[in-house]
Image (spheres, coloured by chain):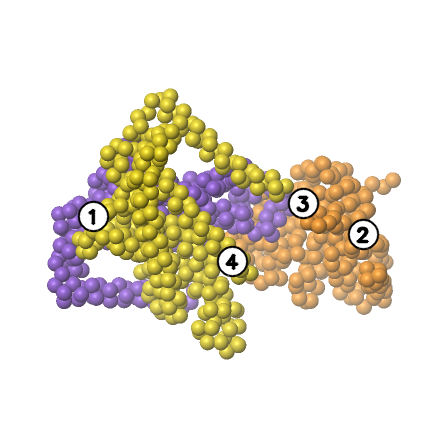
Chain colours: A orange, B yellow, C purple
Amino acid sequence: MNMAYISLNNVNKKFLTRRSEIYALKNINMSFNKGEFISLVGPSGCGKSTVIRLLDDILKPTSGEITVDGFTYNNNVSIPKDVIKKMGFIFQVPNLYPWLTIRENLMLPLKIYKMKGTEYEQYASSLLDYVGLADYADSYPSEISGGMQQRIGVIRGMIHKPEIFMMDEPFGALDEDTRENLNLELLEIWKRTHMTIIFITHNIEEAVLMSERIYVMSSHPGMVKSELVIDFGGRERNLDLISDRKFAGYCTDIENMIGTLRLDEIK
Amino acid sequence: MKHNRKIMSFLAPVTLITIIIIIWQAGCTLLHVSEHILPSPSAIAAAFKNDFVRSILPDALISLRIMLSGYLIAIPLGFMIAALASQSKFITRMILPVLIILMMIPMATLVPELKLFLGVKPSLKILVIILQTAPVIAVNSLSGFTHVPHNKTDLMKGLGCGKTETFFRVVLPNALPQIFTGLKLGCILCMIAATAADMSVGQGGLGYRIARSATFSATSTAFAAIVVAAVIGVAFYMLVSLVESIVIKWKQ
Amino acid sequence: MRKNGNSLVNFVNTVYPPVLLIMFLLIFWQTVCSVNNIQVWMLAKPTDIFSKFAANTKDILPHIGITYSNILIGLVLAVVIGLLIAVITCSFPVAGAALTPITVSLCCIPMVTLVPTLMLIFGVGRSVKLITIVIQAFPIVTMNAATGFLNADPAHLELMQSLKANKFQQFKYCLMMDALPDIFTGIKLSSIMAMMGGITAEMTGGNQGLGSRISFYIGFSKTPEALSCIIYIAFLGALLYSLISLIEKKTVRQ
């Protein structure tokens, strides 16, 4: 059997509130192959963010286990540090530290992982050049716009050259144009680095544009409702794709799925 | 879980203090420390029994009366100064540095001069306490009044509200945390100023009792008075903190 | 950093209003004393103080040095100890539960009450003043620092968690910086306590420092000299507060 690069096996996550237990995630089974671009879509509250935090070991599963590159971790076992170094994590908000310059913010993960050397400093400079923010390297986050901050957030997630890139609605707070530009930049980065990218979004078009596979999730409790393969027959993924008939078809399918999910919830 | 934490937050300090008292007592007894230099807890307890009603209690009441008089006058005084100054940027810029300098000066330094000028009276101590406490309350209240988020004051302007109404509806509630910082700090400084003034001026009060007992090497009595001063100081602070939590809760 | 216009103009605009007020108060003081013919020994006029200021400064120079150095050293020690205790209190819950009530109580106790006893044990030298200052001042640093550490931005902490930073790294790169505004508030407030503790201790015993000089001069009815001591104390207070504010501006970025 082909062992997936990353997999969640029978993962459940319960949260205890003052009055009751809430199932954030129930019976989650997902797998991701190396170098794939996969999105998780679903209504808000379906546990997409929780999945990423379980993968990153910020949260522990109530039951079930997670395997990354052969290492398994669960409620009792923590993720080993060398596996963590293979992962990069992008938040919904840029989350830059206001007291550090842009360059210092960018290099922060290297300090935590104790990765030193001129090769990383050169990589940082090239990343700044790539997103067009080299002139702002010595500025502070308060001096640049939200879109620019989020670009820095994205390259900060990559500074330690991870193999796995996990992104939690990274472009949700941005305007349409900036988001489209960043989507294309991300696809470029993916082509160059061959990272495994797990992308969370509530924007269906964004997901269809970029992903090879999409997991559609339902909420209350969070479960995997279905899995879709997005196949454009090897066509280049760029903005022209949006006019493709298949594109609209995929979007409608997913919208219907989420639509039915919502009807299910009402019942 | 919460239950355990509450028990621990009570037991932990009580245990620590008990251990300290035991070590203190043991140290004094075993090392034969003279009672005149460092009295043991048992000596202090004995001094309590002997001197409390006779000398410590009347002095404590004098101190309490002076402190409360000074504090209760300083509050409206400091508050008024801050409220009026906050109405004008120019006046704020003019008065704030002066208030800060007044805040930093230990007013006990004025006692010798005031003794010459006013003579030795209880009102001298009260004046010192007011001079010490009012600037602290004024500085913190002024800081609170002048740091209201602009969107809130702009909203009031947009609704056509005058300065007075804006002050009471928006500025004052927003400034409450800072005002209470001033009040709490003020009550600590009030206590210190009262005790220092007692020591300089005499005429009763806990500071006077402590200084006088130390002169006669009645160190146990001095320490008993120190304990009473500590209890009063802590109780005063707790009272102001309690008022703060009630007011803040009511505001929400 | 935004610079509104010329920084020299800004400086003048900030400085002239309080200077105006102080001049006004001095003139008022001078007038009231002159008009009512108040004797010098009772309340000195500004002109009396000013005429004797230079000569007097030479006399009290060693005392100025002692008071200024005591309070500065005491404050630095209090800040270091206060921060250490805050770190301990926040890192170890049991220690925190035990130490917090004691710390809060310590700041409410007038340390000047212990000065007579401390002088019996330690003599009337510098150590008594330093002990008084440190014990009076450190609790406020601890209380404000603890508030800062406990109210750190959770989003900032989540970044640390996602990088699996250890406790020391979390403190160094995130907690400490998030808590800086509160820590500086604590340092400003505790500088008031340091002044109180140091100078009242000088007034209570021993004959070193500006505090002791005040009673000394009044005893000889040398009021202008006594008041010039108070001016030097006021200057120290202003200096301390400005210094702390300056360091705060340079280090805190939020």
Q: CA distance from mark 1 to mark 3?
A: 62 Å
The local secondary structure at tag 4 comes to: helix
**Camera sees residue B172:** yes
Q: Kindly report the distance in space between the C-alpha atoms of the residues bearing marks 2 and 3.
A: 20 Å
Q: CA distance from mark 3 to mark 4?
A: 35 Å
Alpha-carbon neighbours of circle 1 within 10 Å: few (<14), some, or many (≥20)? many
Q: Is residue C55 visible?
A: no
The subunit letter for the residue under badge 1 reads: C
Give the CA distance from mark 4 to mark 1: 43 Å
Q: Residue drawn at (46%, 34%), measured in percent from left and top?
A: B17
Same chain for mark 3 and mark 4? The answer is: no
Are discs 2 and 3 located on one and the same chain? yes
Three-letter residue code for mark 2:
Met
User: Disc 1 to disc 2, how far (Cα)?
Assistant: 79 Å
* Residue type of the residue flagged with mark 1: Ile
The mark that comes first in sequence, 2 or 3, is: 3
Q: Which residue is mark 1?
A: C214
Please name the amino acid that badge 4 sits on.
Ile
Which residue is denoted by mark 4 in the rendering? B248
What distance separates the C-alpha of mark 4 from that of mark 2? 43 Å
SS state under label 2: strand
Q: Position of residue B169 (x, y in %)?
A: 49, 69
* Residue annotated with mark 2: A223
**Outermost residue toward the right?**
A1
Q: Which label sits on residue A58?
A: 3
**Are the residues flagged by discs 4 and 1 from a single subunit?**
no
Q: Quadrant of the N terminus of chain B?
A: top right
